Amino acid sequence: MRRYSSRRRTRPVAEINVVPYIDVMLVLLVIFIATAPVVMQGVTVDLPKAEAETMNEDQKTPIIATIDRAGQYFVSIDASSTKMPDLNAVGNFVAQELSKDPSRPVVVQGDAQVPYDAVIQLMNALKNSGVDSVGLVTDPL
């Protein structure tokens, strides 16, 4: 004899539980927010304040030659910044980058506490390496 049970057979439910995925996404978001300032490396300088024209937004990202308060040289291309040992290295590095894309603008970013002579020497090294036009970076008044 067959016994009938009062329990019904249930089919398995084919649903995806998305709560763990949301948790993982939020953790990744927090990690990216915490690491973004570290990835965006740059050289911190106290720029002189002056009224000046801004660069056009349709221009390419400039190559930035920087001299900081301690007199150290850096060259920034896009988001990466490279420390340079001396003025000759700055000129050679910028000339090499300009050979890849001659239409990129070159700007000098000097700390406000750096002697005027150091900024002029940097601009002269860029001119000697073949840079036709050099701009100066300032903070607005």
Image (tube, grey):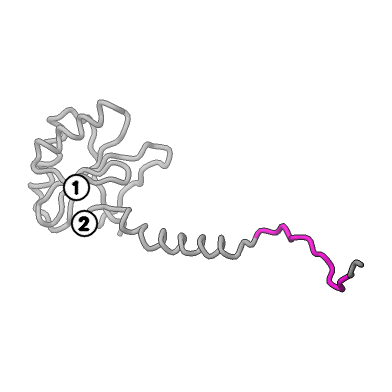
| Disc assigned to residue 129 | none
Whole-percent x and y of residue 48? Answer: 22, 56
Whole-percent x and y of residue 16? Answer: 66, 58
Under circle 1, the secondary element is: strand
Give, as a single range, the part of the protein colored magenta: 4-16
Residue hosting label 2? 45
90 lies above or below 138: above
| Disc assigned to residue 66 | 1
- Left or right of residue 2: residue 101: left
Q: Residue drawn at (39%, 37%), measured in percent from left and top?
A: 59
Judged from this view, the residue extending furthest toward the front is 1
* Amino acid at circle 2: Val
* Amino acid at circle 1: Thr
- Left or right of residue 74: residue 28: right
Q: Determine contact: label 2, label 1, CB under 8 Å.
A: yes
Q: CA distance from mark 2 to mark 1?
A: 8 Å
Under circle 2, the secondary element is: loop
Whole-percent x and y of residue 29? Answer: 46, 61
Q: Quadrant of the C terminus?
A: bottom left
Please identify the dominant SS of the magenta region. loop
In the image, is residue 7 part of the stretch drawn in magenta? yes
Which corner quadrant of the image does residue 1 belong to? bottom right
Whole-percent x and y of residue 124? Answer: 12, 36
Q: Nearer the viewer, residue 55 or 3?
A: 3
In the image, is residue 32 part of the stretch drawn in magenta? no
49 lies above or below 52: below
Q: Residue drawn at (42%, 42%), measured in percent from left and top?
A: 57
Q: Residue drawn at (90%, 67%), measured in percent from left and top?
A: 2
- Left or right of residue 127: residue 16: right
Dot 1, crowdedness within 10 Å: few (<14), some or many (≥20)?
Answer: many
Q: Nearer the viewer, residue 96 or 130?
A: 96
